[in-house]
Amino acid sequence: MALTMRESRWRGALLEAVSRTLPQAGTVVDVGAGTGSFAIALAAERPDAAVLAIDGDADVLERARSKPGADRVEWRTGLAGELPLAAGQADAVVMSLLLHHLEPDAKRAALTDARAALRAGGWLHVADWGRPRGALPHAGFAALRILDGRAGTADHAAGRLPALIADTGFENPSLGMRLPTVWGTLEMLAARRP
């Protein structure tokens, strides 16, 4: 993944974007945190912040808890669309490479739930696949769609993710980065809750 997806470049840019919008002593939630690499990096970058990492796979979270630096993160089991959070609890919500795994209704529920978890003025940060641009990203994304399913990736292939974010109540989704990779074109989007 590190080589074919240019992971260090986009993860570093995502870390910077989240850190820039997070207020002093703010709370950030990493939804679909997986093995926790991003949440741990964010906790190291912003020791003043409360970092919550949520994933639906308890075994994956157990691995995450064993990593160096994991003690700075609060780990919770939960699913996008059913987040174990109070309304208005977060200043930022991060979803990286999560949304393309979800069917359209679940994707909308996940974004709506993220909006509910954010305080007014809070930020949503998404790093996920956009419409592929260029021959190699187009071919790679075609293969990825076979692996991950066409229903979940349809909005991404058509470039509809910014509109979907706006439709769930966020202001002005903006593109922070577009990065061609072997598996498609990765886009970083940010949007504010009014």
Image (cartoon, rainbow, N blue to C red):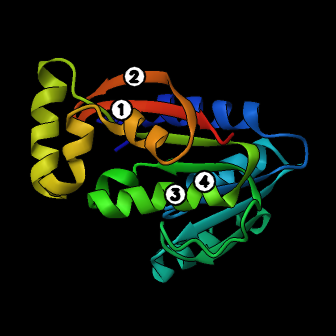
Distance from disc 3 to disc 4, alpha carbons, whole Å, reads 5 Å
Amino acid beneath label 1: Leu
- Of circles 4 and 2, the one toward us is 4
Distance from disc 2 to disc 1, alpha carbons, whole Å, reads 6 Å
Distance from disc 1 to disc 3, alpha carbons, whole Å, reads 22 Å
Q: Residues within 10 Å of mark 2 (few under 14, many from 20)?
A: some
Could you say whether the residue bearing mark 4 is in a helix, strand or loop? helix
Judging depth in this view, the residue of 150 and 70 nearest the camera is 150
Query: Where does residue 159 sit, x and y in percent of width and height?
Result: 28, 31
Q: Which residue is mark 2?
A: 178
Label located before the other in sequence (4 or 1): 4
Q: Is disc 3 in contact with disc 4, using a CB cutoff of under 8 Å? A: yes
Query: Where does residue 76 sit, x and y in percent of width and height?
Result: 63, 76
- Quadrant containing the N terminus is top left
Q: Which residue is mark 4?
A: 115
Report the disc number at residue 112.
3
Identified at 19% across, 45% down, the residue is 154
Label located before the other in sequence (3 or 2): 3
- Of circles 4 and 1, the one toward us is 4
Judging depth in this view, the residue of 185 and 155 nearest the camera is 155
Query: Where does residue 73 sit, x and y in percent of width and height?
Result: 73, 64
